[in-house]
Image: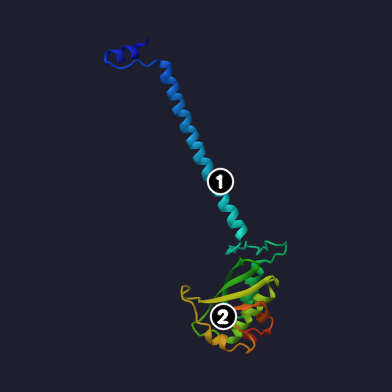
Amino acid sequence: MDGRDVIALARGHRPVSSALIRTAAHRTARSSMTLRTARTRGVVVRLCILLLAVSLSGCGAIGSLRGEDSRDSSTFELQDLYDAVTAADDRVTRASAIVSTSGFSRTLSLVVIIDGEQTVSTSTLTAILVAARDTTPDKIATISVMAREATEEERIMDLSDAVAGLPPDVTPIGAVTMTRTDLDKLSPVAPSGSE
């Protein structure tokens, strides 16, 4: 009997051996560690499932800076696209884009910064669309264009007048989203400075 057992007896309690206390403490610590390990494993498993689901779904997945195709090795440089679009018309000061995938369909979402507050002409819009078409692979099924003012980039420019002047056999989806079939119907336009 050790000192704790004597104190327990003096208080009218049943004595507990030190070995039993140590065993109980060891079991508690071990079960606590097992519980933490199980929780950690659970979090890791959930994270792996989430990453797998995101990688398999492909919906809304954003392409890399190289515009890589997840189904094969064909790539294109977004910088080439930016250069072509800004060279297409004097009013275009900057361009940026992302490539997104939904199922097997790939969309290029292009934002152009337009200098000046005048409405965007059909020739400017056509030049932008043709430049984007000519610098992207055929695997890009649709191209979407949004124009913003250079002086106030938060302001989205209305492109309805420019769309109205497109050839009658071209049918934009929504504001200015065009399929590859419609893009192929557009003829290149001389740069605005040479007219």
> In what quadrant of the picture does the C terminus appear?
bottom right
15 horizontally vs 114: left or right:
left
137 horizontally vs 32: left or right:
right
Q: Which residue is mark 1?
A: 45
Q: Nearer the viewer, residue 65 or 73?
A: 73
- What kind of residue is marked 2? Arg
Q: Which residue is mark 2?
A: 91
> In what quadrant of the picture does the N terminus appear?
top left
Which of the 4 quarters of the picture holds residue 84?
Answer: bottom right
Q: Is residue 30 above or below residue 53?
A: above
Q: Is residue 92 above or below residue 15?
A: below
Q: Position of residue 43 (x, y in %)?
A: 51, 45
Q: Secondary structure at mark 2?
A: loop
Q: Which mark is residue 27?
A: none
Q: Position of residue 53 (x, y in %)?
A: 58, 55
103 horizontally vs 19: left or right:
right
Q: How many marks?
A: 2
Q: Position of residue 150 (x, y in %)?
A: 50, 76
**Residue at 32% in and 11% down:** 6
**Residue at 43% in and 16% down:** 19
Q: Residue furthest left?
A: 11
- What kind of residue is marked 1? Val
Q: Position of residue 147 (x, y in %)?
A: 53, 77
Query: Mark 2 packing: few (<14 Cα in 10 Å), some, or many (20+)?
Result: some
Disc 2 versus disc 1: nearer the observer: 1
Which of the 4 quarters of the picture holds residue 102?
Answer: bottom right
Question: What's the CA distance linking mark 2 and mark 1?
Answer: 52 Å
Q: Secondary structure at mark 1?
A: helix
